[in-house]
Image (cartoon, grey):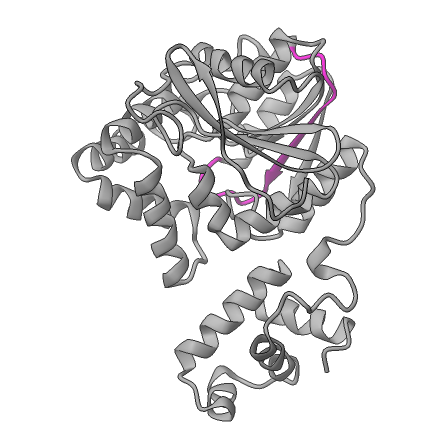
Amino acid sequence: MDLEDHVVRYAEHDGASIAWSAVGQGPPLVVGGWWSSHLEFDWRNARFRRFTEALAHHRTVIRYDRPGTGASDRDHAPTRSLEEELATLETLVDKAALGRISLFGASSGAGVASLYAARHPDRVERLVLYGAYARGVDVAPPAAREAMLSVIDRHWGLGSHVLADLFLPDATADERTEFVEIQRHSASREVAFASLRAVYDSDSTGHLGDVLAPTLVLHRRDDRAIPFALGKDVAGRVRNARFVALEGHDHFPWRGDTDAVVRETLAFLGAPVEAAPAQRAGGTAHLTEREREVLRLVAQGQTDAQIAAHFVLSAHTVHRHIANIRTKLGVPSRTAAAAWALRNGVI
């Protein structure tokens, strides 16, 4: 399937429609189980799409929205337990006729991914857990959990902004606005509250020891949302687990050093490890002509103000151009973008 293809399909489960999509080529890799998601709006996010496409060059990436969220049946009550989450995933795998699969369970999605692996050892080839935790109560102190639930319950708009502070520590104003909009489109206030409550109530300690599939556990050392120690704890509970510590503080795998997440994941899954598509030599065709010119000046060491004067633009516009360039190249900083330009002959 061409990476540009993004068709939302539906599978019926317990009277509700589960929205799912598949992009890429190769053996199936199911990615999902987020507490809140939206197939269409997530796909429009440049960072998220680049992360998914990097995996999809070697695997058929299947994503889905949980009942009550995203493009799935919004009139259906949200799932409130790991058992309900499991039933949704089982239906998706069966109705999509996926056969043997690998699973990428990130954050709250790690619970259902590991439970599926424990219950269906014959169906799971490999399991990747990223930013995972075994017990939701360990994610934050009781007062912090109740405060987060309270702000979402009383004012979902404000709650989505609070989540942006937690999940996007280095985001631009535009990225924060986009995140807030995606959250609001993904779930209603009632569903967001119930879903986060389910996250805090979840407990995977009873099944992690039953996972037989080879498992890779990835966790960033300074993850601001899920403490590093919780990832190490998960790895210690899975008998065939290998733990890899990653640098950075971003919780979402599509932010920060995304390439490290993709590289470790694909290597573990047995796919060829190579430079991400955006980082191959000469790969500037995805940049606009203006972005290539801005990148050339960045690599020459010019400041935003100097670049703005060169093009007769505002410094804010130049800053936005550079943010877009970094997103497309998948690099974490202005310095890294300049280094990429030097390596690839942009100047």
Is 140 placed left or right of 243 in the picture? left
Q: Nearer the viewer, residue 235 or 277?
A: 277
Task: Using residue 203 as the reference point, say whether residue 215 is left or right of it.
Answer: right
Q: Residue at x 44, y 23 (%)?
A: 18
Q: What secondary structure prevails in the magenta region?
A: loop
Q: Is residue 133 left or right of residue 210?
A: left
Compare residues 173 and 14 and report the one nearer the observer: 14
Rendered location of residue 2, percent (x, y): 67, 44
**Residue 11 visible from this viewpoint:** yes
Q: Is residue 217 magenta?
A: yes
**Residue 314, image x and y in percent?**
40, 84
Q: Position of residue 330 (x, y in %)?
A: 62, 58
What is the quadrant of residue 55 in the picture? top right
| Residue at image location 40% in from the left, 33% down from the top | 71
Quadrant holding the N terminus:
top right
x 61%, y 7%: residue: 119
Classify 270 as above or below 320: above
Counting the numbered discs, the total is: 0
> Could you tell me which quadrant the C terminus lies in?
bottom right
Residue 47 position (above or below residue 160): below
From this viewpoint, is residue 255 visible? no
Compared across the picture, whether 131 is left or right of 28 comes to left
Give the magenta-colored segment's residue range.
Answer: 211-226
Q: Residue furthest left?
A: 154
Q: Position of residue 237 (x, y in %)?
A: 62, 17
Which of these two is toward me, 333 or 123?
123
The verdict on residue 149 being magenta is no
